[in-house]
Image (cartoon, rainbow, N blue to C red):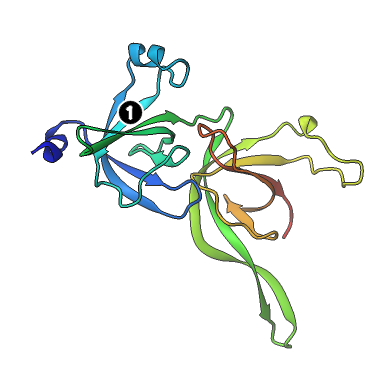
Amino acid sequence: MIEDDLSLMDGHEAVIVRDRAGAWEFPVSLIPRLLSVREAAKSDGAYRMGDVRLHAQANALSIPAKPGDIATRADGSVYTILSVDTATLGTRFAMVTRRCVIEGATVVEAELYRLSDRKDSMGAVVLDHVPSGVSYTAQMQPMDVGSIEVADDERERPARVWRLYLPSMPSLGVNDAFRIGGTFYRWSASADSDRIDMLPNVELVELPL
């Protein structure tokens, strides 16, 4: 049957496909194929060498993927989805993806902490950061503070600022924080870029909590 022929092909790889907003994720068996020089040239700039087309059965995802969603391959490399196309009588689909390589970034495990209140032994309310139970394999990049504009009525920014690129953008409270390598960082700005080839990201500042 047409819908079964993809399962007979070699080169299957376990890939996790995530909604950009973090609403869902699914492990999927896909077949990766590098775009050819001809395909990249015919795309009128939409695609380039190194982009990867991922093939799958049409029913592999219960929620359809869309441009801007994220695919994490078996080796941990992260790709953003540029386009999604159906082919072969609608029995399979293909996603053209592009690897997100952030210059100067380090791969880290970032654990999200939420601000919570509790009462101490005297009954006083104490604010504290507690683990949310959610962590991300992310890319952490030091920022050039000298290039960041600061409004006249704002405090001078701390000297140590980073940008954290995430596989999906979590819902963040104003006082939430990330714990990375034993250090806590507060997020000060988010940038869920309109560019579908860029990962959602947050600006981090190392501060005592």
Give the residue at x 12% y 40%: 4
Q: Name the residue under label 1.
A: 53
Q: Who is closer to the viewer here, 175 or 67?
A: 67
Q: Is residue 117 found left or right of 135 in the rendered image?
A: right
From where the camera sits, is residue 182 visible?
Answer: no
Q: Which residue is rendered at x = 61% and y = 36% of the image?
A: 141
Mark 1 Cα within 10 Å, few/some/many (few <14, many 20+)? many
With 127 as the anchor, is 198 left or right in this view?
Answer: left
Which residue is farthest right? 152
**Whole-percent x and y of residue 25?**
39, 51
Where is residue 156, by image quadrant?
A: top right
Tell me the quadrant of the picture where the C terminus can be found.
Answer: bottom right
Instruction: Report the residue at 48% width, 46% height from top.
Output: 20
Name the quadrant of the N terminus.
top left
Q: Which of the 4 quarters of the picture holds residue 158?
A: top right
Residue 150 at x, y = what percent? Answer: 84, 39
- Given residues 8 and 3, the one toward you in this image is 3
